[in-house]
Image: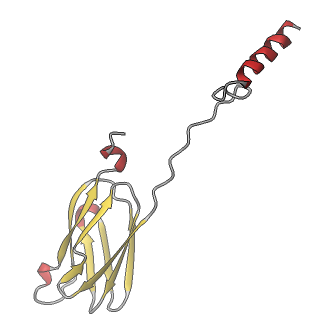
């Protein structure tokens, strides 16, 4: 009988406290939602990408959509191991998660005429938001 009274007393005490665990159960901390994909749309035409600078966040999935306006083009970021080809008038996609922060050069790796060597740009991968906030 003493155990029953003690149990009832503990329940009554806990009932008045919103932070008290219900029947010994504690809620688990909420898990952060997975990061949303970021879609980056680019065009390629003889000797230029638009935009020629892309900013993304470390750890956030990226879908890069590249449309060629005139002829076959390539797109490669050697330091990230990315590469795609796109045919004239078509759009090609590559999905990736930038794992390391920094500035990375990209360029066309399919010869498209005199001036081809100028067809380049940069991808800036900003550090994770949590890292910037000190979390």
**Residue ranking furthest to the top:** 2
Position of residue 98 relative to residue 44, above or below, is above
Name the residue at 32% across, 62% down.
56
| x and y percentages locating residue 106 in the rendered image | 22, 70
Left or right: 13, with 74 as reference point = right
Q: Is residue 4 left or right of residue 135?
A: right
Nearer to us in this view, 76 or 20: 20
Q: Quadrant of the C terminus?
A: top left
Side of 28 where 78 appears, left or right: left
- Extreme residue toward the front, this view: 16
Query: In this image, 15 relative to 133: left or right?
Result: right
To which quarter of the image does residue 2 belong? Answer: top right
Instruction: Where is residue 20? Give x, y as percent.
Output: 66, 26
**Point 79% across, 11% down: residue:** 6
The percent coordinates of residue 76 (x first, y second) are 26, 72
37 or 14: nearer the eye? Answer: 14
Q: Give the image quarter of residue 74.
A: bottom left
Q: In which quarter of the image is the N terminus?
A: top right
Give above or below for 115 relative to 121: below
């Amino acid at each position: 009988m003493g155990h029953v009274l003690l149990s009832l007393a503990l329940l009554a005490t806990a009932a008045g406290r919103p932070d008290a665990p219900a029947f010994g159960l504690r809620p688990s901390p909420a898990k952060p939602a997975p990061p949303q994909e970021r879609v980056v749309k680019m065009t390629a035409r003889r000797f230029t990408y638009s935009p020629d600078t892309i900013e993304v966040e470390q750890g956030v999935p990226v879908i890069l959509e590249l449309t060629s306006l005139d002829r076959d083009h390539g797109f490669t970021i050697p330091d990230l191991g990315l590469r795609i080809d796109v045919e004239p008038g078509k759009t090609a996609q590559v999905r990736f998660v930038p794992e390391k922060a920094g500035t990375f050069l990209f360029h066309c790796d399919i010869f498209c005429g005199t001036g081809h060597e100028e067809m380049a740009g940069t991808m800036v991968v900003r550090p994770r938001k949590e890292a910037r906030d000190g979390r």
